[in-house]
Amino acid sequence: MTPNPPIRVLLTKIGLDGHDRGYRLVATALRDAGMEVILTGPWMSAASVVNIAVQEDVDVIGISSLSFDHLLIPGLMARLKTDGPENVTVIVGGIVPDEDVPLLLEAGVAAVFPPGSSLKELVVFLRETVNANRSGHLAIASTPVEEAIHD
């Protein structure tokens, strides 16, 4: 039996948000958990993110937002549907007002992780989601996202 390849995660910032401390900490935690992490610089466009996701054959796109650039994510999700890889999981981390979370989830984002979220729960969520995607099953995390993001 062939072992599963490492989970490949693209961590990025879109729009004009240049704050990078949080997503660098997440990158370290994911690498420590055995995942391969592709870290872009800030100020990426949706087209660039989709192109990188295709070129790097990623399982996950993680978008960090500490300003209102999360409002660009529905456009990114639309572009992913037409030009992106299949079965890619998109997550968002950072400061997202509660009233904007439904907009992101309706656009297809798998989960939103606010500041203070548990890195351990993020790792568990990604492993479960990607393993389900790879096996062709509906991804359902054993820990409810509401609990995981506030841990």
Image (cartoon, rainbow, N blue to C red):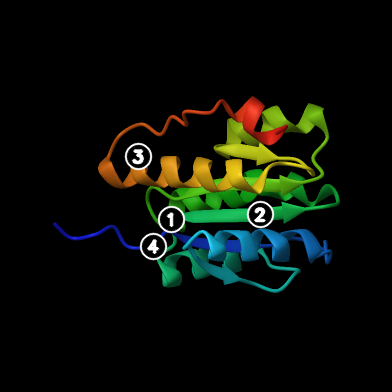
How far is the residue under mark 4 from the one under mark 3? Answer: 14 Å
Q: Which residue is mark 2?
A: 63
* Residue type highlighted by circle 3: Ala
Q: Nearer the viewer, residue 76 or 53?
A: 53
How far is the residue under mark 2 from the one under mark 4? Answer: 20 Å
Of the image marks 2 and 4, the number of the one nearer the N terminus? 4
Front tag of 4 and 1: 4
Of the image marks 4 and 1, the number of the one nearer the N terminus? 4
Left or right side of 66 for 142: left
Front tag of 4 and 3: 4
How far is the residue under mark 2 from the one under mark 1? Answer: 13 Å
Q: Position of residue 22 (x, y in %)?
A: 77, 59
Which secondary structure lies at badge 1? loop
Which secondary structure lies at badge 3? helix
Front tag of 2 and 4: 4
* Residue type highlighted by circle 4: Pro
Q: Which mark is residue 59?
A: 1
Of the image marks 4 and 3, the number of the one nearer the N terminus? 4
> Badge 1, how many Cα within 10 Å: few under 14, some, many 20+?
many
Front tag of 2 and 3: 3
Q: Which mark is residue 132?
A: 3
Please name the residue shown 55% across and 65% down the image. 31
Please name the residue shown 53% across and 53% down the image. 79
Q: Position of residue 11 (x, y in %)?
A: 61, 62
Mark 4 near mark 1, Cβ–Cβ under 8 Å? no
Q: Which mark is residue 35?
A: none
